Image (spheres, rainbow, N blue to C red):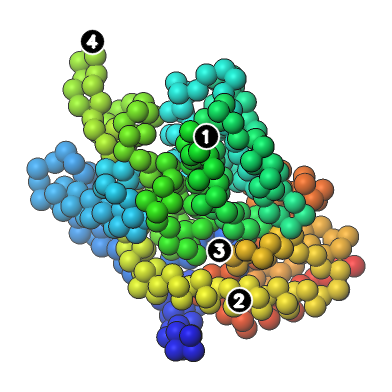
């Protein structure tokens, strides 16, 4: 164990991220908004520059050299994504614009699968992107949305989940890790119990992928979605994994180029997987950079990342709790490096503004998870989310800034 910590050299890792050298308002940047988006290492920036400098072309349709090179690089990236998430087949990997897009593909696809009175189950800890598309699905089909509630610690109440499941349940969808609180949900149990009643499961892995390497086959999950930009990749690209039999069963989401087999005005037939769900010109450069980002994360190693981030979480939690009147929301024993908190009688937005003046980027607000804020009866929280390139010294700077904000605002 001692050896592993020595192998993880955060100061060396920070050299990979040019943005970490900049200042904000004359202070060194402290970037603690990693749950919203991660920063980009030089290798990923280089891959983007290389694409546009040397082989920018549309893919799959061209015979010319540039198009072939771009196609090859894009398909290499798909293969890297397949290997990282351990999908059985490459064609089960649909490259989308991100988690939100991926969820909408499935929610729209289920329109013809569900009937009036069918039930679908969501958790109380979801991001809006894993709530709203399903509410829209219920409006279209007459299906009923049920909610697994949460407790004060920010954990799901699994007893109620057991009671909600029945032969009416057709689909269950939950995140692996809550972006607002950091809670790690028991997805193995959720998936297993859903399958016992014949329901399919979608896991939103947007917040877990930066910390944990998932294995979709071991999980036996039906759908798994993620975004590259939370994993050191660029924005506007992400993953929809679906089991082959499900993806074959669901209709295409968008019509257009790339997703067809034959088009006539009488009838169009669709392309096979994965192209059926990839209408139009994709984010080619983004897809390629997604593959490079996964290589980068794997070169550091998810075991090292998780162990180091947990160290930051424990340190940050302890230091912040030393501030009088500070309350942390989300106190599950199973959580990742997200600390959501408030100062007594002070609006989170005011604190966020003051700490930004000191060069520290935290997020304030409802974090796209209003039901969680409603549960705690608060307008929002201040959220500091740590990544493997953050340091304890940066946490000390945050603690000092929060103390300063408290003194100014109370
Ligand atoms: C960020 C996030 C999303 C949305 O991801 P986009 O990239 O904005 O589509 C969904 N769910 C969770 C848990 C997230 O953290």
Q: Residue furthest front?
A: 196
Element class at badge 3: loop
Q: Nearer the viewer, mark 3 or mark 1?
A: 1
Residue under pointer 3: 34
Element class at badge 4: loop
At a point 27% along the width and 43% down the height, the residue shown is: 91
Residue under pointer 1: 197
Residue 106's image quarter? top left
Q: Dot 1: few (<14), some (14–19), or many (≥20) neighbours within 10 Å?
A: some
Residue 169 percent across, percent down from the top left: 56, 30
Residue under pointer 2: 312
At a point 88% along the width and 60% down the height, the residue shown is: 345
Q: Earlier in the sequence, mark 3 or mark 2?
A: 3
Q: Dot 2: few (<14), some (14–19), or many (≥20) neighbours within 10 Å?
A: many
Residue under pointer 4: 266
At a point 43% along the width and 70% down the height, the residue shown is: 302
């Amino acid at each position: 164990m001692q050896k592993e910590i020595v192998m993880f050299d955060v100061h060396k890792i920070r050299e990979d991220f040019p943005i970490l050298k900049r200042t904000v308002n004359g202070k060194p940047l402290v970037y603690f908004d990693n749950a919203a988006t991660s920063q980009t290492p030089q290798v990923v920036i280089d891959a983007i520059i290389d694409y546009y400098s040397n082989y920018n072309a549309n893919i799959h349709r061209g015979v010319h050299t540039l198009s072939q090179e771009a196609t090859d690089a894009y398909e290499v990236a798909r293969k890297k994504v397949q290997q990282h998430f351990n999908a059985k087949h490459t064609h089960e990997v649909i490259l989308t614009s991100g988690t939100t897009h991926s969820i909408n593909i499935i929610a729209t696809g289920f329109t013809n699968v569900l009937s009036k009175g069918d039930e679908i189950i969501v958790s109380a800890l979801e991001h809006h992107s894993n709530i709203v598309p399903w509410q829209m699905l219920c409006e279209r089909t007459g299906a009923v949305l049920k909610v697994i509630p949460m407790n004060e610690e920010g954990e799901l109440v699994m007893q109620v989940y057991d009671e909600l499941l029945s032969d009416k349940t057709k689909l269950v969808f939950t995140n692996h890790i809550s972006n607002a609180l950091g809670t790690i949900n028991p997805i193995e149990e959720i998936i297993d119990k859903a399958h016992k009643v014949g329901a399919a499961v979608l896991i939103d892995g947007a917040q877990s992928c930066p910390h944990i390497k998932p294995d979709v086959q071991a999980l036996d999950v039906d759908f798994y979605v993620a975004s590259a930009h939370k994993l050191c990749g660029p924005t506007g690209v992400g993953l929809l994994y679906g089991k082959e039999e499900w993806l074959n069963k669901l209709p295409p989401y968008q019509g257009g180029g790339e997703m067809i087999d034959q088009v006539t005005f009488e009838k169009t037939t669709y392309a096979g997987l994965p192209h059926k769900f990839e209408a139009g010109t994709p984010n080619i450069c983004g897809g390629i950079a997604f593959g490079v980002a996964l290589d980068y994360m794997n070169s550091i190693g998810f075991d090292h990342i998780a162990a180091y981030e947990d160290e930051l979480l424990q340190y940050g939690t302890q230091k912040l709790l030393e501030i009088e009147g500070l309350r942390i929301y989300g106190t599950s024993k199973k959580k990742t490096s997200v600390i959501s908190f408030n100062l007594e009688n002070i609006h989170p937005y005011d604190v966020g503004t003051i700490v930004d003046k000191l060069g520290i980027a935290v997020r304030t607000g409802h974090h796209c998870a209003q039901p969680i804020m409603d549960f705690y009866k608060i307008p929002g929280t201040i959220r500091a989310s740590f990544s493997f390139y953050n340091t304890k010294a940066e946490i000390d700077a945050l603690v000092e800034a929060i103390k300063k904000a408290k003194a100014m605002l109370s």
